[in-house]
Amino acid sequence: MKLEHRRIHIEDIQFGEKTSVKNGILMVNQEELIEVLKEDDKIQDVKVDIARPGERIRIIPVKDVIEPRVKIEGPGKGFPGALSKMEQVGEGKVNILYGAAIVTIGDIVGFQEGVIDMWGEGAKWTPFSKTYNLIIDITPIEGLDPHTHEGTVRVAGLRAAEYIGEAGRGVEPDEILTYEMCSIAEEINKYPDLPKVLYVEMLISQGLLHDTYIYGVNSQLILPTLLHPNEELDEAVVSGNCVAACDKITTYQHQNNSVILDLYAQHGKTLNFMGVIMTPELTTLDGKFRTCDYTAKLCKMLGADGVIVSEEGYGNPDSDLLMICKRLETAGIKTVLITDECSGRDGMSQPLADTAKEAIAVISTGNVSHVVTLPPADKVIGNAESIATLAGGWAGALLEDGTLMCELNAVVGSTSEIGYHNCTVELY
């Protein structure tokens, strides 16, 4: 499979008469966008706003972040199986409005999710302070059951990204990145002396507000599945996870999975990247044994020498992470884990809910319990009072002057377990 990411660098978003891109400026006809989204009779109201890097704007509560794109050549269109008809993706050419993002907000079955600050202390912790954000505030009609409510908002975000992405169809890119990989057998023949490495991507799969979709199928319903890495980079995977904002993998981060991009960068040089195993994180004991055993079996059948495992969430999924590690290391497969820590506000608590002596190579993406103080915003898009019920927030977290105190738990992407974030390590 060969996939081209054709990046059109976006340097500003403005409202205008026609949705278009020219000289790095994305113009958006907000009335037309609202009309498109309100074609769904389950949506009562839509508001659209803009937030740019450096502006003293707070966005809360955020549901998802999505990169606007358009497929200009090859199979598939706009999140196959989840939004458009089912087609195999991973090949062709995609025009990307690079630097722009669709950010969905609103009351998601009771307030959920997190905060994005576009300036100051908060901006240091979220990668989406650096994108030009088009905020879509969605109000569904009253009386929807919780699953329909969540699905309505999720699909509206995808539709907004597809509508905006069309503006890039005829625009020449500023940058072209190519991702190409043949069959596993062909790649082994090409690089017989390089270690064969698989990526196991654990996905939240635990029920309402804890879901991920692969070609439109809820990952709760699948056994661990092998994907070509290009499929994830070509919109086959969509986030439906709306709880701990710090380490949820937004749809934007699936579209630009940083573990995949890093492995591609080393493919044929220091390692032979063989693909991605999508592994659901289930809540039942039988489910955990089934998925962890099956994941290890796939890795062994494919002859992996090394495996990188990334987690999504913490607590309950920590058991799956360590169970997979134990099985792989026992089979002689070198295993590296990527996880964040829930170490308490003083950093002194046990970081994971489970442990295993086989976990000897672990990368931490930060402590979700770390408390940050975010200064008052000049403008709040959404509802700042929702911090009281977000994971990482509490009653009284919003002070009278607009200052907001919260754990990193509440900051979107702050401890991303695929490494798509701004955390760094200081050495003393």
Image: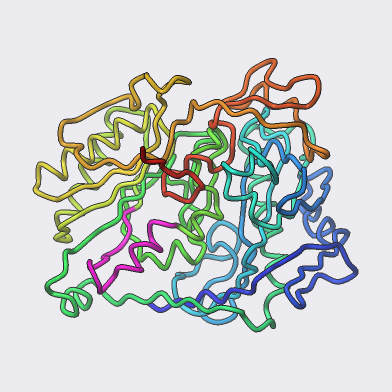
Q: Quadrant of the C terminus?
A: top left
Vertical order, 224 against 159 (above or below): above
**Residue 270 image position (x, y, % from top left):** 23, 68
**Toward which corner of the image does residue 77 lie, by quadrant?**
bottom right
**Toward which corner of the image does residue 324 lie, by quadrant?**
top left
Q: Nearer the viewer, residue 287 or 11?
A: 11
Q: Residue at x 45, y 57 (%)?
A: 257
Q: Magenta stretch containing residue 260, yes or no? A: yes
Q: Residue at x 69, y 36 (%)?
A: 61
Vertical order, 63 against 66 (above or below): above
Q: Magenta stretch containing residue 228, yes or no? A: no
Vertical order, 315 against 171 (above or below): above
Count of numbered circles on the image: 0
Q: Nearer the viewer, residue 12 or 155?
A: 12
Outermost residue, top direction?
395
Outermost residue, front direction?
428
Image position of 89 (left or right of 262): right
Q: Nearer the viewer, residue 25 or 119?
A: 119
Q: Quadrant of the N terminus?
A: bottom left
**Residue 282 image position (x, y, % from top left):** 37, 35
**Residue 65 image position (x, y, % from top left):** 62, 50
Image position of 73 (left or right of 268): right
| Residue extent of the magenta highlight | 258-277
Image position of 400 (left or right of 108): right
Q: Residue at x 86, y 62 (%)?
A: 15
Q: Residue at x 29, y 43 (%)?
A: 337
**Residue 254 image position (x, y, % from top left):** 49, 55
